[in-house]
């Protein structure tokens, strides 16, 4: 018989069908349903999302005289990758840390998009680095 770190036998899981297990299974099912619905809605509204993003890029370019055009395009690429992940498509190579899509899509999730998106560079402009949490931060 194996023992736990305190020298006592490890605790066995509760009886099947306990209220906690019932709740956890229900919560898991609700999360899967919500994720599937979000993916479907995102996929169905891809055109609206893309149009709004293009309008935002034009507005920023107009207001700033295109001084920040390359940074805005980089941000647009990152947003498009995020939309791909939410819609259920696998993350493209070089996607931000922690943004990978699940290894298997939720049951009933829409198929991966067939339209290519603008790829963002793996690393932002000079003066940025990956922090200990894997996220990009500005160097001081």
Image (cartoon, helix red, strand yellow):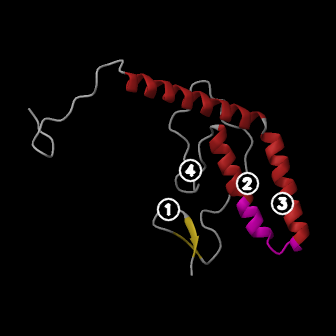
Drawn side of residue 26 relative to residue 79, left or right: left
Q: Position of residue 112 (x, y in %)?
A: 66, 35
The secondary element bearing badge 2 is classed as: loop
Compared to residue 6, the image places residue 137 above or below, namely below
Asked whether disc 4 touches disc 3, contact meaning CB atoms under 8 Å apart, the reply is no
Residue at image position (18%, 35%) is: 10
- 10 Å neighbourhood of mark 2: few (<14), some, or many (≥20)? some
| Vertical comparison of 88 with 134: above or below | above
Q: Name the residue: 62% across, 37% down.
A: 88
Tag of residue 112: none
Pick the quarter of the image with the C terminus: bottom right
Which residue is under mark 1? Answer: 134
Q: Badge 1: how crowded within 10 Å, few (<14), some, or many (20+)?
A: few
The Cα–Cα distance between marks 1 and 4, rounded to whole angstroms, is: 11 Å
Residue 108, position as x, y percentages in the image: 61, 24
Q: Circle 3 sits in a helix, a strand or a loop, which is it?
A: helix
The numbered mark, 4 or 3, whose residue comes first in the sequence reads 3
Q: First in sequence, mark 1 or 4: give its number.
A: 4
Prevailing secondary structure class for the magenta stretch in the rendered image: helix
Is 41 placed above or below 26 here? below
Quarter of the view holding residue 6: top left
Left or right: where does residue 15 sit relative to residue 67?
left
User: Element under label 1?
Assistant: loop
Task: Choose mark 1 or mark 2, whichever is in front.
Answer: 1
- Pick whichever of labels 4 and 2 is earlier in the sequence: 4
Residue 99 is tagged as 4
Provide the residue designation for mark 2.
Answer: 118
Q: Upstream in the sequence, badge 1 or badge 2?
A: 2
> Which residues are drawn in magenta?
64-75
Magenta region includes residue 70: yes
In this figure, which residue is indicated by the disc labeled 3? Answer: 57
């Amino acid at each position: 018989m194996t023992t736990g770190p305190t020298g006592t036998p490890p605790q066995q899981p509760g009886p099947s069908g306990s209220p906690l297990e019932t709740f956890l299974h229900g919560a898991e099912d609700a999360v899967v349903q919500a994720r599937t619905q979000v993916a479907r809605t995102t996929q169905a509204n891809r055109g609206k999302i893309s149009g709004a993003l293009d309008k935002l890029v034009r507005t920023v370019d107009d207001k700033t005289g295109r001084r920040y055009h390359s940074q805005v395009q980089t941000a647009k690429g990152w947003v498009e990758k995020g939309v791909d992940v939410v819609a259920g498509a696998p993350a493209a190579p070089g996607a931000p840390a922690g943004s990978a899509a699940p290894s298997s899509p939720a049951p009933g999730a829409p198929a991966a998009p067939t339209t290519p998106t603008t790829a963002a560079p793996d690393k932002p402009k000079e003066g940025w680095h990956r922090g200990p949490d894997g996220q990009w931060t500005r160097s001081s």
